[in-house]
Amino acid sequence: MSGGANLTFAPWGATLDELRSAAGAARSAGASCVWLAELHRSAFTTAAAVAHAAAPAGVGTAVALAFTRSPLTIALESLDLDELTDGRFRLGLGTGVQRLNEDWHGVVWQRPLHRMRDVVAIVRLVVAGASEGRDMRYSGEELRLAMRGFRRPVEAPRRAIPVYLAGVGPRSLALAGEIADGWISHELTSPSWISQCALPALADGLAIKGRSRADVDVVASAVVSVDPDVSTARRRAAGTVAFYATVRTYREFFAFHGFNAEAEAIGAAFRGGTPLAGLSPMVPPAMVDALTVCGPAEMVRRRLAELGQVVDTVKVSPPTHGLTDEEIRAAQTAALDVVAGMDSRTTREA
C-alpha cells in the first residue's frame, strides 16, 4: 500500500459461518490481519471462529473490552488464541465508555487509565510466566494479582503477545505510547486528526519511557463505503457517523473536525427517542466525507493511500449501522474489491 502501511480488514457476518467466509475473503484480498470487534458478539470467540480461515494473516481483537473480564481471563484467552493461530494473535483492548461498563456490564467505572495500565501489566505477566510455574505477583493502583504454583500445562507459542490499545483522548493516547505495542484509532478518523492530535499524544507517552515511534504500530480505522454514486456511498456510511455522534465521550473529536453542533443535535435527538434510521439524515455530507472513506472505487483507493501516509496500518471495515444485512453484504464486497485492488504489501514487520 502507498506509504508502506499494512492493509488489514475488519470482517462482518450475520452468522459465524458468514463471518468466517468474510475473513477468508479478506485474507485472499491481501489483508495482513483480520480484526474482530466486541459489541454484539465476543471478540475472543469470533477471533477463534475465523482463525483457520484467516491463515496466514494475523488475527486481532479491535477491540475487546478490558474491564468486563479479569486480567487473568484475558491472558488465558489470549494464550489460547495465540496457540490456535500459531502465534498470529494480536490483543486489542479498549476501556469502553462509562455507560457501557456500568449499565451494560455492571462494572465499576473508576480511574480507567490506571486500571488499563494494571490490566496490561497483569496480562503480560501471565502470558510470560503461565507455562513456567513461577509465582506471579503484581500490585497496581487499581488491580492486584497473587498466584503461587500456577502452571499452564500447555506450551505457548510465544512468551509475549502484542498488546494494542484504543482511545481518542490525549491521556489514553499517551498511555498507548507509553506501554502498548500498537494503538488502534476510533472507527471514525481522519489523516488530519491523526497527524495533529493522535501522533503528538502518542509521542508524549513514548517519551516517558524513552521509546521510539517505531515501537508502536499505529492503526487507523477506515469505514469504507464504495459506490459509483457518491450520495449512495455517503448514505450507507451516515448511520455509523450518527451512531457515534450519540456518545458524549467523542464530542472533542467531532469538535476538532468542526461538527460539534451537528453531533450535539444528533445526540439530543437520540436522547429524545429518535431511532438510528431517523438520525442518519441529520448527518451532513461534509461530516460523512470528513470521518469516513466514501465514493467511487478510485476515490476510495486514493483516500486510503492518503491515510496510509500517516500511519503504519489501515484497518478497513464496511459500514454497518442502520443498514440491512443485504446492504452490509454489498458494502463489504465492494470494500474487499478495493482492498484487493491495492498494493497491500508492507514495509513494516507485521
Image (cartoon, helix red, strand yellow):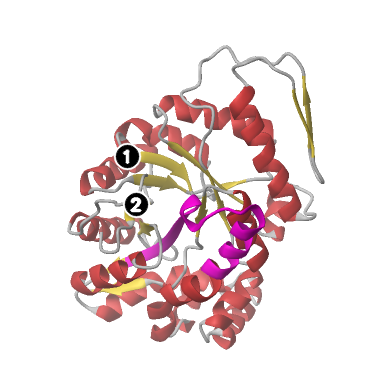
Q: Earlier in the sequence, mark 2 or mark 1?
A: 2
Q: Residue at x 70, y 47 (%)?
A: 117
Rendered image quadrant of residue 314: bottom left
Image location of residue 214, percent across then percent down: 46, 54
| Magenta segment boundaries in residue numbering | 199-224
Q: Residue at x 49, y 35 (%)?
A: 45
Q: Secondary structure at mark 2?
A: strand
Q: Most extreme residue toward the front, as rendered?
A: 210
Mark 2: amino acid: Thr
Image location of residue 84, percent across then percent down: 42, 26
Task: Using a 10 Å C-alpha cutoff, classify the residue at mark 2 as few (fewer than 14 neighbours), some (14 to 19) or many (20 or more).
Answer: many
The C terminus: image quadrant: top left
Vertical side of 286 occupied by 185: above or below:
above
Is 165 left or right of 60, judged from the image as shown?
right
Q: Residue at x 59, y 55 (%)?
A: 176
Mark 1: amino acid: Ala
Q: Secondary structure at mark 1?
A: loop
Labels 2 and 1 touching (C-beta < 8 A): yes
Query: Looking at the rendered structure, which numbered label has been put on residue 8?
Result: 2
**Closer-to-camera residue (18/152):** 152
Image location of residue 69, percent across then percent down: 67, 38
Residue position marked by numbered label 1 in the rendering: 57
**Closer-to-camera residue (11/103):** 11
**Closer-to-camera residue (103/127):** 127
Task: Using a 10 Å C-alpha cutoff, classify the residue at mark 1 as few (fewer than 14 neighbours), some (14 to 19) or many (20 or more).
Answer: many
Image location of residue 240, percent across then percent down: 46, 68
